[in-house]
Amino acid sequence: MCYLWEFSSHITHRTSHITTMKFYSTKHTAPATDLKEAVIRGLPADNGLYMPELIRPMEDGFFEAAKDMSFPEMAFQLANRLLEGTIESAALKEIVYDAVNFEAPVHFLDEDYACLELFHGPSFAFKDFGARFMARIMSHFVKGSTEKLYILVATSGDTGGAVAQGFLGTPGIEVIILYPSQKISELQEKQLTTLGQNITALEVKGTFDDCQALVKQAFLDEELRAQLRISSANSINIARLIPQAFYYLYAWTQAAKKGKDVVFCVPSGNFGNITAGLIAHKMGLPVKHFVAANNSNDVFTKYHQTNIFEARPSVKTLSNAMDVGNPSNLQRIQDLYQNDIEQIRTHMSAYSFNDEQTKEAMKELYNKYQYLACPHTAVGYLGMKSYFEEHGKGATGVFLGTAHPAKFLDIVEPTLDVKVDIPARLQVLMAREKEAELMPTDYETFRAYLMKLV
């Protein structure tokens, strides 16, 4: 069965082949640009998000052939197609192979359910894929420059740790991580605040949305940008998004061996992760359907149901990395589907779950399958269950395991009444002292902090 997308043009001069990929803004008022500017700038001047001008399907036979490729090889082939002409092929291959140097296994629970484990990288979270790739792309572009590049990143939990690990020690790049005070786990906080070197943490007295708003305002501040070279490491940056498409392909090659259609369920907060899956789908990846699983921050689920989007302040939940009340990447999803909610519904379902349901799912996974899951992963499992309840089984349901359960000891251990083994690398961090500067939510204070770096 084939689920190829019918491509719809955003520009009139698009052809079946393009020499060098350009990137346009989802708001369509800023000029298209090359990969270097899209990555270094992070955000277009019109406050849209960058997207590749052309998403071409892979060559006939590629996906069957991919079943016999290594993970880095298939990732390189995907990247080479999507970033066509932007980076010399040998350099891109080196970047991909260096970034994708750990596994992403699909763990089958039974004939219907499987978990794509994305927590085997340096920070034990799925965002390692995007952060490592982006760090190497940026390093490639700033090589030889005497001007320092400052990476600004807002985190609701796992992004900060992944970015910190991905950029740690990178010459010419300084990383400033904004995180919401008392709204991430202790281990997540230690991953941001104990590394030193070129990593600085700002503890914002607000929510993730406040952190994200500060970062976005900085990117739109032309006076600031004229004096300070800044870029983003959030999923608003196209370089963070693209490598997340890699593991959907790798997971599909594993799950498809069962001989059934494949459905992916993605625990979703800022919606970068599922957007990457949709891009892979647009490139021809034969996935039957995608499911977005929200926690109580259910603005996308309500939009999916009503075609009315209403951003609202995020609320704190057990699955804190998904506590987003105004998901940035909704712009990209709407752009992929030409703002047509019926098209979105054709390719995506959406469900939301509260903390009590999340705890029950964690217990079910442990008692039924002897599987330890972090709360985000448990929300993904719930979304997969809801999809099967609504549409029936018959496909292999792959829900994404986004973080190692040890990162949420304060939730996993009392919920399941078990002792979780902490990986040695996380134990080392726990023993270190936190270093972070408190920051209010007003932009002028943040701007003044940045101007001191000039």
Image: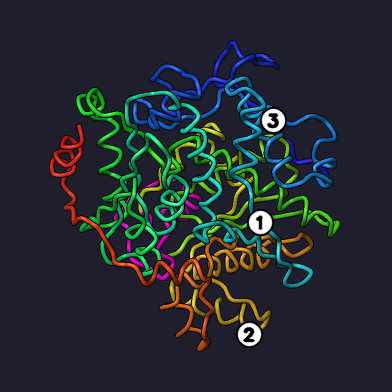
Q: Quadrant of residue 97?
A: top right
The magenta segment? 296-324
Q: Residue furthest bottom?
A: 417
Q: Which residue is mark 2?
A: 367
Q: Nearer the viewer, mark 3 or mark 2?
A: 2
Taking the spot 70% from the left edge, 17% from the top edge, the residue there is 16
Q: Which residue is mark 1?
A: 104
Q: Earlier in the sequence, mark 1 or mark 3?
A: 3
Residue type, label 3: Glu
Q: Which residue is mark 3?
A: 6
Q: Nearer the viewer, mark 2 or mark 1?
A: 1
Taking the spot 69% from the left edge, 43% from the top edge, the residue there is 72
What is the quadrant of the C terminus in the image? top left
Q: Are marks 1 and 3 in contact (CB under 8 Å)?
A: no
Tag 3, which secondary structure? loop
Category of crowding for the residue at label 1, using alpha-carbon neighbours closer than 10 angstroms: few (below 14), some (14–19), many (at least 20): many
